[in-house]
Image (cartoon, rainbow, N blue to C red):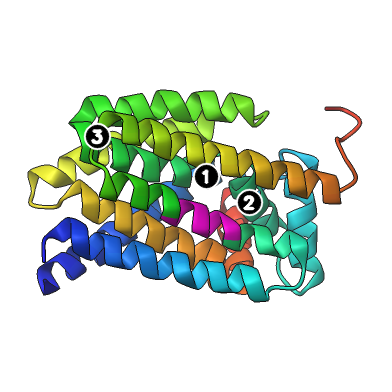
């Protein structure tokens, strides 16, 4: 097995573990750090599977998009923007 | 194969030290950068964790920080060497701006990680090992025990503050 395949196995296992934790965690705000781990794993898998400059753009776009979604979900649960924002 | 696994674990340790150091230096545990990050910190504290560690975890969720910078720089170096890593840093900066964050921790992390990872590729490591290593490193903070991780981060923040 070549190193990138072994790296991919680690990434996939971490991603599956994080997905299970997201599914079984009851508190929505505390789901988000697990979802963050899942986003790391997916972004890593995109780069490992497709070694092409545009894959870097895809990985960053996916990661930033998922971060922004988590940010929006968490801020909604917190009751919207701070007054001084 | 065992060599690769050992290098992934070593890369994980290097990435962990890098992103924790940068995040703590950039005061991520001080307060929630946006209301959502503060809410995540408070949710972790309510369940028995430490508030400032929780704030840092909330900030990591809500905007690309040094950990995201390290991961994406590793992806950039894997795909295109140093120019790839620096391109990732630029994209992280844009991502930070989208997420309503000044972006210093994420961008600094990505630039530093680019050179650290490139240095390690000169001594036999592969950038792909850093990609897997960073995923393992973020798992230890965000994915195993929120309470334990928040207490550890709060202790580190105590040294910094």
Q: Quadrant of residue B41?
A: bottom right
- Image location (x, y in percent) of residue A73: 75, 48
- The residue where tag 3 is placed is A52
Residue B72's place in the image compared with A31, above or below, is above
Whole-angstrom CA distance, mark 2 to mark 3, is 33 Å
Residue where numbered disc 2 is placed: B56
The chain to which mark 2 is attached is B
For the magenta stretch, what is the residue range?
A: A35-41
Q: Residues within 10 Å of mark 1 (few under 14, many from 20)?
A: many
The quarter of the rendered structure image containing the N terminus of chain B is bottom left
Q: Is residue B27 visible?
A: no
Give the x, y percent position of residue B78.
22, 41
Residue B90 placed where, x, y %?
A: 42, 23
* First of labels 2, 1 by sequence position: 1
Question: Who's the residue at 51% across and 58% down the image?
Answer: A37
Q: Which residue is mark 1?
A: B23
Cα–Cα span, label 2 and label 1 = 8 Å
């Amino acid at each position: 097995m070549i190193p990138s395949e072994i790296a991919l196995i680690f990434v996939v296992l971490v991603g599956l573990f994080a997905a299970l934790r997201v599914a079984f965690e009851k508190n929505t705000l505390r789901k988000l750090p697990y979802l963050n781990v899942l986003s790391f794993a997916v972004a890593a898998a995109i780069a490992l599977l497709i070694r092409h400059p545009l894959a870097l753009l895809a990985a960053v776009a996916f990661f930033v998009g998922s971060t922004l979604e988590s940010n929006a979900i968490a801020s909604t649960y917190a009751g919207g923007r701070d007054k001084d924002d | 194969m065992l060599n690769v696994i050992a290098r992934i674990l070593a890369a994980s340790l290097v990435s962990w030290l890098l992103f924790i150091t940068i995040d703590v230096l950039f005061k991520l545990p001080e307060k929630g950068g946006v209301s959502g990050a503060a809410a995540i910190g408070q949710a972790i504290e309510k369940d028995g964790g430490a508030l400032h560690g929780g704030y840092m975890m909330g900030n990591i969720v809500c905007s690309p920080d040094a950990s995201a910078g390290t991961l994406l720089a590793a992806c950039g170096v894997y795909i295109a060497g140093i120019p790839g890593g620096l391109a990732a840093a630029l994209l992280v900066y844009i991502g930070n701006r989208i997420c309503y964050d000044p972006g210093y921790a994420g961008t600094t992390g990505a630039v530093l990680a680019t050179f650290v990872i490139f240095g390690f590729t000169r001594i036999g490591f592969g950038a792909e090992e850093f990609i897997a290593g960073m995923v393992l490193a973020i798992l230890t903070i965000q994915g195993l025990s929120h309470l334990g991780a928040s207490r550890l981060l709060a202790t580190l923040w105590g040294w910094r503050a």
